[in-house]
């Protein structure tokens, strides 16, 4: 197809620009003001004006923004709202996985895949997840959550604990416990819990969900949920042990809301939805198996959990499995 290589190349440049402009707050500023004077904006934010202008010109090629003829100011373009809503995915792939992307050519070689052979930036992955989670997950999850009352929730693979913090802030009677394996994320989560004044109601436990042991904070949990972590528990045999173990260490939990992205198995097409290809390629590079939805359902049949519902969310090939203690 003529021009396709140029389109791909230009899209790669714009992906980096969208991530960078999101990181410095440009999209929020343009959304709030509706028009930005480039000199004033770059001076106020101490940004290199020629770089900002060049990135914006690139974005104008895809109608994300419109620069004035004299390039002195910028307004949203026809694609601005769509990019604004999806900007977290760009930050996720460029900032979260950038180091890995640049090393694809190295880590695709079997000989290079030993030790810590890839790098991700957990802080940016968490920041990006908060953005696209807010846009595409939270409202759907709240609707599922509202179907049954609970008093204490556990979030497995809680990251920065933002979901628990939000829940507990809204309801002063709720209590929670976050479980997280990554030491950096645990530190961030504990800091945010303290900042939110929730330390008396929300505990962060540093542990591997794949090998959980009984903990006093788990005993009275009556709802468990997990977001975008459970694929990490595969392969199948290992995941079955982990799911049955969760059943055992949370003895008073009747409901487990497991939300994750599953393998698409969709035919190749330039119209793939946003996120999916990035998710599948990066996890393949990391050697992490991603089950499809049929494999998840087949696994649940072998565990102590039964599937009471399967709710779509705003992210392609992702859903909340509503699991009940059986
Ligand atoms: C993609 S992030 C999602 C974070 C958060 N749940 C959210 O929705 O924003 C996955 C998180 O799960 C954590 N994680 C992955 N495997 C884990 C395991 N076996 N035990 C505990 N945490 C794990 C990671 O460290 C990371 O913080």
Image (tube, grey):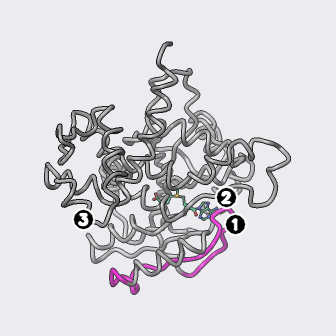
Image coordinates of residue 172 in percent, x first then y, are 27, 77
Q: Point out the quarter of the image occupied by ligand 1.
A: bottom right
> What's the magenta region?
195-216
Of 113 and 156, the residue lying toward us: 113
The residue to which callout 3 is attached is 43
**Quarter assignment of residue 69:** top left
Q: Establish whether ligand 1 lies closer than 8 Å to the Cβ of label 1.
A: yes
The residue to which callout 2 is attached is 242
**The stretch drawn in magenta includes residue 259:** no
Report crowding for label 2: few under 14, some 14 to 19, many 20 or more residues within 10 A (C-alpha). many
> Residue at 30% of width from left, 50% of height from top?
139
Q: Establish whether ligand 1 lies closer than 8 Å to the Cβ of label 2.
A: yes
Of 17 and 225, the residue lying toward us: 17
**The stretch drawn in magenta includes residue 198:** yes
Distance between the alpha carbons at the discs numbered 1 and 2: 7 Å
What is the number of the mark on residue 211?
Answer: 1
Image coordinates of residue 324 in percent, x first then y, are 50, 52
Image coordinates of residue 185 in percent, x first then y, are 53, 71
């Amino acid at each position: 197809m003529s021009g396709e290589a140029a389109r791909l190349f230009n899209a790669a440049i714009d992906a980096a620009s969208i991530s960078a402009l999101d990181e410095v707050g440009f999209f929020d500023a343009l959304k709030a003001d509706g028009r930005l004077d480039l000199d004033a904006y770059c001076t106020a934010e101490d940004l290199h004006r020629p770089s900002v202008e060049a990135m914006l010109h690139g974005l104008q090629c895809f109608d994300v923004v419109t620069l004035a003829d004299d390039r002195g100011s910028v307004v949203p373009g026809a694609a601005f709202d769509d990019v604004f809503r999806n900007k977290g995915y760009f930050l996720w792939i460029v900032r979260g996985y950038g180091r890995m992307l640049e090393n694809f050519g190295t880590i695709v070689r079997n000989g290079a895949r030993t030790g810590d052979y890839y790098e991700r930036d957990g802080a940016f992955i968490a920041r990006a997840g908060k953005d696209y989670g807010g846009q595409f997950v939270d409202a759907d999850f709240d609707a599922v959550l509202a179907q049954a009352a609970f008093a204490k929730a556990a979030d497995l693979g809680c990251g920065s604990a933002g979901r628990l913090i939000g829940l507990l802030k809204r309801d002063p009677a709720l209590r929670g416990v976050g479980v997280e394996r990554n030491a950096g994320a645990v530190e961030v989560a504990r800091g945010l819990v303290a900042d939110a004044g929730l330390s008396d109601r929300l505990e962060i436990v540093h542990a591997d969900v794949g090998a959980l042991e009984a903990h006093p904070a788990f005993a009275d949990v009556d709802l468990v949920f997990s977001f975008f972590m459970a694929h990490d528990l595969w392969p199948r045999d290992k995941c079955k042990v982990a799911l049955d173990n969760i059943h055992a260490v949370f003895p008073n939990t009747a409901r487990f809301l497991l939300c994750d992205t599953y393998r698409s198995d969709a035919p190749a097409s330039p119209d793939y939805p946003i996120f999916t290809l990035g998710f599948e390629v990066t996890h393949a590079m990391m050697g992490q198996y991603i089950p499809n939805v049929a494999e998840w359902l087949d696994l649940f049949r072998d565990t102590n959990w039964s599937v009471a519902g399967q709710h779509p969310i705003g992210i392609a090939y992702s859903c909340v499995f509503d699991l009940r203690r059986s």
